[in-house]
Image: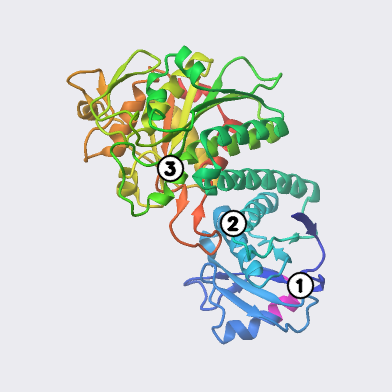
Amino acid sequence: MKIAISQSVPSTIETPLLVLPIADNGDKTPLPELLAADPALRALAAPLIAAADLTGKFVELVWDLSPAGVSAQRVLFIGAGKRDKISLSQLRNLAGAAARAAKSKNIKSFVLVLPELLEIPAAAQAAVEGIVAGDFDVDTYRTDRKDQALTDVTLAIPAAADAGAVFQSIAEGAILAESQNLTRTLALEPSNLMTPTMLADHARAMCEEAGLACEVYGPDKLKELKMGAFLSVSQGSEEEPRLVVMRYEPATAPASPVLGLVGKGITFDSGGISIKPADGMEKMKYDMCGAATMIGAMRAIALLKPDVRVISILCCSENMPDAKAQKPGDVQFAMNGKSIEVINTDAEGRLVLADGLCYARQLGATHLIDAATLTGAVVVALGYHNVGVFTNNDGFAGELMESAKRTGEKMWPMPVDADYFDHIRSEIADIKNTGGRWGGAITAAMFLQEFVDDMPWIHLDIAGTAWLEENKAWMPKGPSGVAVRTLVDLARHFKSTNSK
């Protein structure tokens, strides 16, 4: 997709579609407001506003197919929500909704007028992120699929705006959204076309393209490293596990700190011997979203070049139930020597992450973040709206939450309290891999904490947010690519002094 800017008067721009944001002024005035100063556009909107056809309700769509007094073939008025609450996050979603509305009409090119009440370069970046993410489709394997991808989009900005700064913001926004879409593309793949080996191959290909170092290891390396927890998960599968190490090591960055990003890459989770119900099991192809998130984040980091070292570990495996599969009651030994009683083989993600976290530390990471579709319990706690954030270091987590706020990704801190450890205390081993029904997302985090020692660490449970359960105006049902933008923003703003 080609993205350009125009500093011409919007009503004079020739385009198949001109998109105009409309704000709800709330109690300040009874009428909504067109967020463009162009007199011709205001005249076009006036009768629609007077007739209450335009309300400004967020992502409300009103089409004008034969607009008078403008050069565009059609105009789309799109609600921006309450004027005093319009934010970059709102604009990002509005732009995505505009993209999807255009695609629904098979319109491949449009102009979006940016609202001047936001800082223009930042608004341009947010709009591009929304448009590129909104251009994503999920019908990959339909034989009658029609290519409705957008070809070019223009952002209409004020004549006084700094075009150079806007172009820079556009480039950054495109990198972030394309990386988010890479994560979504990987997550969308069915498990027969995304085995652990294939996921590792995708990671290696991305690294070669982006200029990152990449190492891929199989079972022999896992045995050498004594990764018994990781290895145990693949016992019942014909597919071999893969351990992937991606490295971003800029020459100008200091030797420390080193961010360690660890992703759960279960390419299909049947539950193993503790097999899942058949209903909805097909979605368990998405259990590798943590690893996909790290692949997308590392791509953006490589292209945006923050001055910090980053190591990413992907723990890729398949959890299947055959005669060799591990059984409830088995005891496994992690890389750090801790013994784990396996109570439920469907609590496998924490087993692979345990060894991944240990290995990230061994490779020199000073700060750890893992991302995983780890528990259904986090969905019970937070629904499908917020990522669960668990940490042993409030300063480090505070930086992450600031990044989440800047990028518009919803995350919520959860407790990591010593009282919860009693739930995973085993009678025959050091710990057990599940703590029962209550507080399941927390006890899963407590399990992972056993493998980080005192190192600053954050666990992101993305089980409720990595996959959209329903269509949004700005994004289709399916993989969301959540946390990619936040992790990249954290790398770009990281201050290790806050996490000591």
- Reading the image, the residue beneath label 1 is 16
Provide the secondary structure element on which disc 2 rests: loop
- Region in magenta: 37-43
Q: In the shown orientation, is residue 274 left or right of residue 296? A: left
- Reading the image, the residue beneath label 2 is 141
Provide the secondary structure element on which disc 3 rests: loop
User: How many residues crowd mark 1 within 10 Å: few (<14), some (14–19), many (20+)?
Assistant: some
- Sequence-first tag of 3 and 2: 2
Q: Of 337 and 331, which appears nearest the observer?
A: 331
- The kind of residue on which mark 2 rests is Tyr
Q: CA distance from mark 3 to mark 2?
A: 26 Å
Eyeballing the image, is 317 above or below 64? Answer: above
Residue at the image position 50 percent from the left and 39 percent from the top: 402
Q: CA distance from mark 2 to mark 1?
A: 29 Å
Q: In the shown orientation, is residue 395 left or right of residue 303? A: left
Q: State if disc 3 and disc 1 touch (CB < 8 Å).
A: no
Eyeballing the image, is 426 above or below 125? Answer: above
- Please state which of the two labelled residues, at mark 3 or mark 2, is closer to the viewer: 2
- The kind of residue on which mark 3 rests is Ile
Q: Main secondary structure of the magenta part?
A: helix
Tag on residue 319? Answer: none
- Reading the image, the residue beneath label 3 is 462
Q: CA distance from mark 1 to mark 3?
A: 39 Å
